[in-house]
Amino acid sequence: MTQQTAVRHPGAPLRAPRHMRSALFLDHLFGSLGLFTVFPVLGLLLAARTPGTGSGWVGAGLFCYTASAGLSALVLNRWLHRVGYRTGMVGGVLLSAVAFGSLPYPSAPWALCALLILAGTGVSVHYTVSRVLIAEAVSDDIGRHKIFSLFQIAVNAGAMLGPFIANALYREGDPRLLMAVIALCYLLAGGVLTPGVPRGHRPPATSGSWPLSRSMLREVVRTSAVWRLVVVGTVGTFAYAQFYSAFALYVGRDFDSGAMRSALLAVPALSIVLLQTLVTAGVGRLMAAGRTPLNLLGHANLLFAAAMLLLGSWLPAAVGAVLAVVVFALAEMVWAPMMSTAFASLRTGSSLEVMHLRQVCRTTGDALGSLAGGSLFLLLHDAGRGGLYWAALGLLTLAATVPLAFRDREPARPGPRD
């Protein structure tokens, strides 16, 4: 991995339009605003649309969306490289707009699940193609990291504002206004993309019809830089998932103050909106000094581990939770954009294929982390051993990260300014 990586596919070079950065920021802002407006009320909406069917269909609907948003781009791999960047990204958000906007009308559970699958498909295709675009259009890791950091700010701004819009507009008997606003958010995302995404270029094809070819899997097994990134990235995602599973359960069960619970869960999003630019500048200086993306991803894992060790320490619960959430917020500001930067910097396969590999790591870590946080943590917590969960997980994160992420350091190689 180097600071400057060549474009991976033949033909005319992909030149980023002048307004690509701002267009992608606004696109992610509107898309995230729509997503985090629907998330707080999606379960309620499904329950209201399927009265008398029990909670099974609510869970099925949520699963359909989550699985589709995580995996659809992999399933559609053989077609993704046949459409242009603009078509894939705009088409993805339009599909999500139509699907979410249609949710208030059918009452059959299977139809609601089908719409959620379509909504997730649009999200999956859009975000995968957008990351491939950055990997291809921006030729240096520092420049890519700046844009991926902008994505992080946009997503968290949407996460802060969305629940307020949901609470203001949701009506159980008539969710049409809320879902129309959500659809409008996705339409706006598609509108701002049009002038900022290059025309006449397509994502590079993978080396086979499968999202991860045999040659890529061989690289994962045989190439040190690749398999170490896969392990460190998956471990970091597993640790990241604890905040939205085990930590959320811990706060909900152990803190009586509603204001305290809300503050603890809101700190990361607020911190990212306010401080991500400063953290990104610091990370950029470290990369310019020779730190590799894998090395910096490892530092984020160490911060996740520190947050968990604080939760499992002898500190009073409130003090430990406050310190842990501050450390977690800093870790997320490094980890989230660096996950995309690190995989984009791999010099193996096509950009589309390495982004598929990133998605597999992200989905695996999220799923296993949420499973552990929602089951094993509760088991230990209810037995009075919740601190053991945090301490063990922090130590395991350290043990899995340190030997893999800090084995090398590359000399700085300046890349072009973007």
Image (spheres, rainbow, N blue to C red):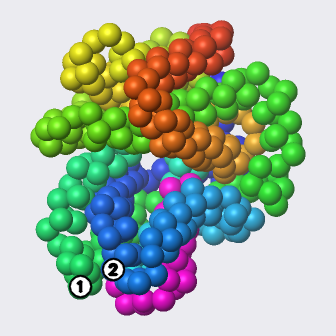
Query: Where, quadrant-wise, is the C terminus in this rendering?
Result: top left
x, y percent for residue 236: 53, 30
Magenta span: 104-128
Q: Label 2, label 1: how many angstroms apart (C-alpha)?
A: 8 Å
Which of the two residues, 310 or 215, is positioned nearer the viewer here?
A: 310
Q: Residue 173 carries which label?
A: 1
Mark 2 falls on what kind of element? helix
Which of the two residues, 209 or 58, is positioned nearer the viewer here?
A: 58
Residue 4 appears in which quarter of the rendering?
Answer: top right
Q: Name the residue under label 2.
A: 48
x, y percent for residue 299: 48, 17
Which of the two residues, 350 or 245, is positioned nearer the viewer here?
A: 245
Residue at x 68%, y 66% (from the top left corner): 76
Is 398 drawn above or below residue 352 in the view shown?
above
Residue 44 appears in which quarter of the rendering?
Answer: bottom left
Mark 1: few, some, or many residues within 10 Å (few <14, many ≥20)? few
Mark 2: few, some, or many residues within 10 Å (few <14, many ≥20)? some
Q: Indicate whether residue 92 is drawn in magenta.
A: no
Query: Where, quadrant-wise, is the N terminus in this rendering?
Result: top right
Q: For this view, does 217 lie left or right of residue 118?
A: right
Q: What residue type is labelled 1?
A: Gly
Q: Which amino acid does label 2 sit on?
A: Ala
Labels 2 and 1 touching (C-beta < 8 A): yes
Is 153 drawn above or below residue 228 in the view shown?
below
x, y percent for residue 127: 50, 56
x, y percent for residue 259: 12, 40
Residue at x 67%, y 32% (from the top left corner): 230
Residue at x 61%, y 34% (from the top left corner): 234
Q: Can residue 158 be seen in this view?
A: yes
Q: For this view, does 256 lie left or right of residue 193?
A: left
Residue at x 24%, y 16% (from the top left corner): 316
Q: Earlier in the sequence, mark 2 or mark 1?
A: 2
